[in-house]
Image (cartoon, rainbow, N blue to C red):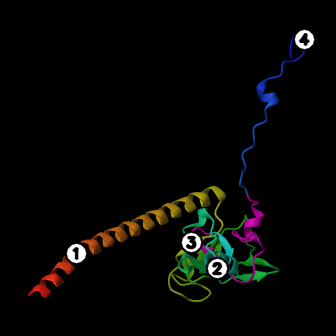
Amino acid sequence: MGCDGGVVARRDDLVKDKKKETKKCNTEDRYRYCSLTHKLFKKRVVCDVVGRLYNKDGLLKALINHEMPEELRYIHSKKDFIELNIEWSNGIIVCPLKKVEFSPGHQFVALKCGCVISKLALDEIKSINGNKCPLCETEGLEFIPLNLPLEEMEKQMELHCKLFDQKQNKTKFIQKEENKIALVTQPIANTIADQAKIM
């Protein structure tokens, strides 16, 4: 190598590092496929607190079989997702009020009652209809934005995972304290019972 007037090979030319695996999903796929099973949406779709969409049967199957991915550990019961009332058009989610398709160009929201509408329709309804869902007349317009940008969604998922972990640690601490109390009270109860036998 070298000494012939040619190019000297460097280490980075000879050794190829493994490229980091990037977990990027196609933006369009997030609007047509389940975030867990990666299958086309079926008629029964649910969303979690972050706004990710799942086929209900796929999510329930993962919960029952304890096969939830680590990044979705904040979903551990049916209380952690909302079943959505969706209007479909040729297999695509459509806003029943504005008739726009659920796509990267149109932000959609899930109301607490489960109705799915576009963000534009929600903004118009707030001024006209007050605090009621325009589809089912349920009080309250609290909503979850669906399919946020990936970076924002990942931050939300991390936040909910941390909250879940803190909640789990609190319950473990309480259980340990209850066990300590049970251990402390048990010998006292035995001594009182023993004293009662003696008398």
- The amino acid on which the numbered mark 2 sits, given as a three-letter code, is Leu
Q: Is residue 124 visible?
A: no
Q: Secondary structure at mark 4?
A: loop
Query: Where residue 158 sits: x, y (%)?
Result: 55, 59
* C-alpha gap between disc 1 and disc 2: 45 Å
Tell me which corner region of the image, top left, top right, bottom left or bottom right, holds residue 93: bottom right
Query: How many badges with numbers are in the image?
Result: 4
Tell me which corner region of the image, top left, top right, bottom left or bottom right, holds residue 24: bottom right
Circle 2 is placed at which residue position? 60
48 inside magenta stretch: yes
Q: Earlier in the sequence, mark 1 or mark 3?
A: 3
Q: On screen, 187 above or below 71?
A: below
Q: Earlier in the sequence, mark 4 or mark 2?
A: 4
Contact? badges 4 and 2 (CB < 8 Å):
no
Compared across the picture, whether 118 is left or right of 19 comes to: left
Out of 120 and 194, give the one closest to the viewer: 194
Q: Which mark is residue 187?
A: 1
Q: Which mark is residue 5?
A: 4
Query: Where residue 127 sits: x, y (%)?
Result: 55, 77
Q: Secondary structure at mark 1?
A: helix
Query: Where residue 88 sits: x, y (%)?
Result: 76, 82
Q: Is residue 113 visible?
A: yes
**Label 3 CA crowd tier, 10 Å (few <14, some 14–19, many 20+):** many
Circle 3 is placed at which residue position? 75
- Residue under the point 64% across and 63% down: 148
176 inside magenta stretch: no
- Residue under the point 77% across and 26% down: 11
Q: On screen, 13 above or below 156?
A: above
- The amino acid on which the numbered mark 3 sits, given as a three-letter code, is Ile
* C-alpha gap between disc 4 and disc 1: 89 Å
* C-alpha gap between disc 2 and disc 3: 10 Å
Residue span colored magenta: 25-51
